[in-house]
C-alpha cells in the first residue's frame, strides 16, 4: 500500500532532523512517483515542520513533482543544444496538444509532461523522451505521430 | 562604546550594533523593504545599502555591524542609484494600478518610487497572470502585487508560529503561498492579519465588507446597529492624520450615527459581561476541580490556533464567547425583543481592530435559527475608508455617548484592547467576587506593558492564583508547550493572538512605527486611570441586564446565549 511505503521510509529515518527532509522527499518520490499532499502531511508530522515549508523546499528543486506520472510520461529537453534546434516550439506544441502545462498530468492519467534541462543526447536535438524512450530531431509534425502512437497503444492494451 | 563617522559627523554606537539601527537613531532614514524590527536581519531586499569606506561593494546596513572608526556615507550618488535600480526592477513586473489599489497612499513601494523620484517604467518584465486568493473570509491575497520581500512569511512563521505560507518555487517563478498552493481557507491560517500589517504593498488586505454595510444602511426595512471594540477609539484617529494614541471615542460614536447606524453600542460593555461570565467560570472551575489552567477565549485567531495545533487543550479554553459575539447574541435576542424587531431584520455590524473577527462571526455556532449574531465586521482601516467615502470628518464632530442598553462600560472592559487587560479586569472582579471587597489599588502593574509574556502570582483570601498573560502566538506556543509538559502553577492564562493585543491587531492602521502601538496602549491606560467606573461588576447596566434578563452568570440564559463550544480542526497540512 501507498501509505505503508511512506511509513517504511520514515521508519528508516527514525530520529532524523530537518536536514533529512530532502533525502526523505527523494525516497518518497522514488516509491510513489510523486509527492502527494498526504505524503507532505506525514513528513510534516514526522519532522515537526510546517507543511508549507516542506512544499516550499520541494518546489525549489526541479526534481520533485506533485502530480502522479501519467501512463505516458513525456520529457522535453530544454538544454542549450535542443533550445538552439527549436525545443521551445516543440514544448509549445506539446502543451497545446496534450492541454497540459509542464509538471501536470492529464485527468485520465494518460499523459504527463515534464521539462528537463539536458538529457545528454545533444546530437539528437531536439529530444523528447516518452517513458524513457528517446525520440530524435522532433518536429511538431512528428509529435503528433508520437502522441497518436501512445493513444493507439492505450487502445490495444485495453 | 565605539565611535564612527556618518556622513562626516562623528557618532557613537554600541559594539555589535547593526549600521541601520545607528543610522535610525541618528535620524537618518534609510529605506528598507524586508527589514522587520525585533527579528534577525534577512538582508534580502538591498534597499538599505550604504557606502562604507574601504569596502569595494555597497554594504547592506541592516545586516552589517558597526566597527571602530568606520566611515559611512548614506546618500552618495552610487547609493541612490543602487536603490533606484532596485525599485525600478521591482516595478518591472508590477501591475501599474496604484489608483485602484487598496494600498494606495499606504504603500511602501509607492512611497519609495516617489521618494527616489522614479518617473518612468525603465525595465519591462513579462507579467505573470496570478489568481487572487479570495478563499478566506478574512484575508485576500493578490500575488500579482507581491514583491517577495518575505515579511508576511516571517511574521507568520517566526512571530506567530503558524507558518501557513512560505515561498514556493524559485527564481522568476517564485511566489508566496500555502502548502500545495491551496487557498488560505484550507491552510493553517488563523486569520490574524499580521501579514497584512507588515505587507509593504497591496498584496495582502482584509476581505472588505464596506459595500455590504452601505447597502444595509440604505435598506429602509433593516435596523442597522453597530458595536465598536475597545481598541478602535484609540487608533481610528491615525486614519485621519491625527497623532497615534488620541482617543476619539465620543467623536467616533457621533460619526457612526452620521453614517446612518440606528444604534451605536460599545463592545467594552460586553467585555464587562465577559468578565462576569469568565470570572464566574474560573471560580467555578477552581472550586469544583474543573480543567485548569483556564484560558481566555476573546481572541478568535487564538481560538483557531488552539483548535488547529493543540486540540488536546480545548477543554482548558473558557466556554465564553468573545465580547463581539456576546453582544451580537444579545442584540438579536434581548435587544430585538425589547425593541419588538424581528432578529432577521436587524443587521449587526461590528468595528474591530481584527481580521479574525470576520472569520469568527461566520462560524456556524455563532448563529441561531440561521441568523448570524454579527453580520459584518469592518476593521479600523475599513471604518476609516467608509468615513472618508461619506465625507465624515471625525475630528470635526461633537462627542456623543453610545446608546443604551449596551453603551455604558467600565474601564476594565476598555483595557481589553491591550495585552494583559482581560487579566487585569478579571482579577479586579475576581477579588470582589471572592472577598466582597475591592482591590486597594486597581492598577495591576505586572500585567501592564507590551512584553510578550507576563506572569503574576497572587493570593486572594487564601486562594492562590497563578496568572499568565501572553500575546503573539509564538509566545503562546511556548507557554502551551510548558502546560502540555506538566506545568501546574497556573490557573488562568490570557492569550491574545497579536503581539501587544488588539491595539496592534491585524485590522489596525497600517505602516505604523512601534511607537504608535505604545501610544495606543498609553491612551487605554489613561482612560482607565481617569474613569469613574473601573470594575466590570460595578457596571450598573451589567447588573440590570442580569436582573432583567440573564438571571445569573453561568445561568441557563447565559449558557444559551453567551457560551459556545470548539471544534478540533483536522487540517492535515498543519504542523508547527
Image (cartoon, coloured by chain):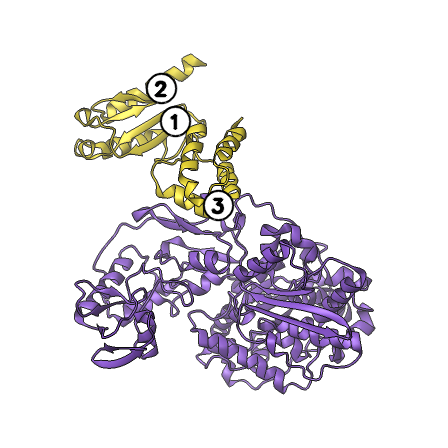
Q: Compare marks 3 and 1 and give the one earlier in the sequence.
A: 3
What color is chain B drawn in?
A: purple
Please determine whether, in this image, residue A95 is positioned above or below residue B167. Answer: above
Q: Compare marks 3 and 2 and give the one earlier in the sequence.
A: 3
Q: Position of residue B504 (x, y in %)?
A: 51, 70
Residue under the image location 69 percent in, 83 percent down? B533
- Looking at the rendering, which quadrant does residue B38 occupy? bottom left
Q: Which residue is mark 3?
A: A51
Q: Which residue is mark 2?
A: A150
Q: Are marks 3 and 2 on the same chain?
A: yes
- Going by the image, does B383 lie left or right of A89? right
- Secondary structure of the residue carrying tag 2 is helix
Q: Position of residue B310 (x, y in %)?
A: 61, 52
Please name whichever residue, A58 or A14, is drawn nearer the observer in this view of the structure: A14
Disc 2: which chain?
A
Disc 3: which chain?
A
Residue under the image location 60 percent in, 72 percent down? B420
Please name whichever residue, B123 or B97, is drawn nearer the observer in this view of the structure: B123
Amino acid at each position: 500500500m501507498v501509505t505503508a511505503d511512506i511509513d517504511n521510509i520514515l521508519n528508516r529515518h527514525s530520529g532524523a532532523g530537518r536536514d533529512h527532509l530532502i533525502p526523505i522527499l527523494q525516497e518518497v518520490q522514488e516509491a510513489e512517483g510523486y509527492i502527494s499532499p498526504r505524503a507532505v502531511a506525514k513528513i510534516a508530522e514526522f519532522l515537526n515542520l510546517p507543511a508549507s515549508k516542506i512544499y516550499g523546499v520541494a518546489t525549489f528543486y526541479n526534481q520533485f513533482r506533485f502530480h502522479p506520472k501519467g501512463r505516458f510520461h513525456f520529457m522535453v529537453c530544454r538544454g542549450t543544444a535542443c533550445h538552439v534546434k527549436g525545443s521551445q516550439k516543440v514544448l509549445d506544441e506539446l502543451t497545446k496538444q496534450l492541454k497540459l502545462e509542464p509538471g501536470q498530468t492529464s485527468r485520465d492519467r494518460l499523459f504527463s509532461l515534464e521539462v528537463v534541462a539536458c538529457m545528454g543526447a545533444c546530437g539528437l536535438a531536439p529530444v523528447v523522451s516518452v517513458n524513457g524512450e528517446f525520440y530524435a530531431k522532433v518536429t511538431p509534425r512528428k509529435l503528433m505521430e508520437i502522441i497518436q502512437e501512445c493513444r493507439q497503444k492505450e487502445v490495444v492494451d485495453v | 562604546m565605539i565611535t564612527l563617522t556618518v556622513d562626516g559627523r562623528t557618532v557613537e554606537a554600541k559594539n555589535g550594533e547593526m549600521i541601520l539601527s545607528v543610522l535610525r537613531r541618528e535620524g537618518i532614514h534609510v529605506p528598507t523593504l524586508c527589514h522587520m524590527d525585533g527579528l534577525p536581519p534577512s538582508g534580502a531586499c538591498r534597499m538599505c545599502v550604504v557606502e562604507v569606506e574601504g569596502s569595494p561593494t555597497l554594504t547592506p546596513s541592516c545586516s552589517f555591524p558597526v566597527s571602530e572608526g568606520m566611515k559611512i556615507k548614506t546618500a552618495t550618488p552610487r547609493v541612490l542609484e543602487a536603490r533606484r535600480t532596485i525599485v525600478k526592477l521591482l516595478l518591472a513586473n508590477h501591475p501599474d494600478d496604484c489608483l485602484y489599489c487598496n494600498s494606495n497612499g499606504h504603500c511602501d513601494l509607492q512611497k519609495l518610487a516617489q521618494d527616489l523620484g522614479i518617473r518612468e517604467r525603465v525595465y519591462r518584465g513579462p507579467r505573470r497572470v496570478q489568481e487572487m486568493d479570495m478563499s478566506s473570509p478574512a484575508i485576500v491575497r493578490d500575488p500579482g502585487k507581491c514583491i517577495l520581500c518575505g515579511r508576511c512569511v516571517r511574521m507568520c512563521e517566526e512571530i506567530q508560529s503558524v507558518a501557513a505560507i512560505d515561498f514556493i518555487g524559485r527564481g522568476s517563478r517564485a511566489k508566496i503561498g500555502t502548502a500545495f498552493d491551496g487557498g488560505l481557507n484550507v491552510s493553517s491560517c488563523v486569520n490574524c492579519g499580521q501579514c497584512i500589517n507588515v505587507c509593504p504593498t497591496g498584496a495582502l488586505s482584509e476581505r472588505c465588507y464596506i459595500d455590504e454595510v452601505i447597502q444595509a444602511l440604505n435598506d429602509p426595512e433593516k435596523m442597522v446597529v453597530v458595536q465598536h471594540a475597545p481598541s478602535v477609539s484609540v487608533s481610528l484617529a491615525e486614519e485621519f492624520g491625527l497623532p497615534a494614541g488620541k482617543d476619539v471615542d465620543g467623536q467616533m460614536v457621533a460619526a457612526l450615527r452620521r453614517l446612518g447606524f440606528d444604534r451605536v453600542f460599545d463592545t467594552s460593555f460586553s467585555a464587562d459581561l465577559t468578565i462576569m461570565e469568565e470570572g464566574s467560570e474560573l471560580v467555578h472551575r477552581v472550586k469544583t476541580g474543573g480543567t485548569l489552567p483556564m484560558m481566555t477565549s476573546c481572541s478568535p485567531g487564538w481560538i483557531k490556533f488552539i483548535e488547529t495545533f493543540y486540540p488536546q487543550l480545548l477543554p482548558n479554553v473558557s466556554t465564553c464567547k468573545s465580547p463581539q459575539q456576546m453582544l451580537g447574541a444579545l442584540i438579536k435576542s434581548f435587544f430585538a425583543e425589547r425593541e419588538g424587531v424581528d432578529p432577521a431584520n436587524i443587521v449587526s455590524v461590528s468595528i474591530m481592530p481584527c481580521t479574525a473577527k470576520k472569520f469568527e462571526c461566520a462560524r456556524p455556532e455563532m448563529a441561531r435559527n440561521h441568523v448570524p449574531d454579527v453580520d459584518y465586521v469592518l476593521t479600523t482601516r475599513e471604518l476609516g475608508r467608509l468615513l472618508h467615502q461619506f465625507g465624515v470628518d471625525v475630528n470635526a464632530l461633537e462627542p456623543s455617548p453610545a446608546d443604551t442598553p449596551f453603551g455604558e462600560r467600565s474601564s476594565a472592559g476598555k483595557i481589553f484592547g491591550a495585552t494583559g487587560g482581560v487579566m487585569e479586569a478579571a482579577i479586579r472582579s475576581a477579588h470582589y467576587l471572592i472577598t466582597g471587597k475591592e482591590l486597594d489599588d486597581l492598577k495591576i502593574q505586572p500585567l501592564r506593558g507590551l512584553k510578550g509574556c507576563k506572569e503574576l502570582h497572587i493570593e486572594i483570601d487564601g486562594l492562590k492564583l497563578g496568572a499568565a498573560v501572553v500575546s503573539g502566538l509564538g509566545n503562546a506556543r511556548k507557554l502551551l508547550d510548558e502546560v502540555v509538559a506538566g506545568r501546574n502553577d497556573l490557573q488562568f492564562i490570557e492569550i491574545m493572538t497579536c503581539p501587544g493585543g488588539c491595539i496592534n491587531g491585524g485590522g489596525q492602521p497600517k505602516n505604523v512605527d512601534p511607537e504608535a502601538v505604545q501610544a495606543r496602549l498609553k491612551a487605554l491606560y489613561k482612560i482607565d486611570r481617569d474613569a469613574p467606573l473601573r470594575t466590570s461588576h460595578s457596571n450598573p447596566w451589567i447588573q440590570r441586564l442580569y436582573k432583567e434578563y440573564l438571571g445569573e452568570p453561568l445561568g441557563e440564559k447565559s449558557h444559551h446565549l453567551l457560551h459556545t463550544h470548539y471544534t478540533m480542526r483536522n487540517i492535515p497540512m498543519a504542523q508547527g
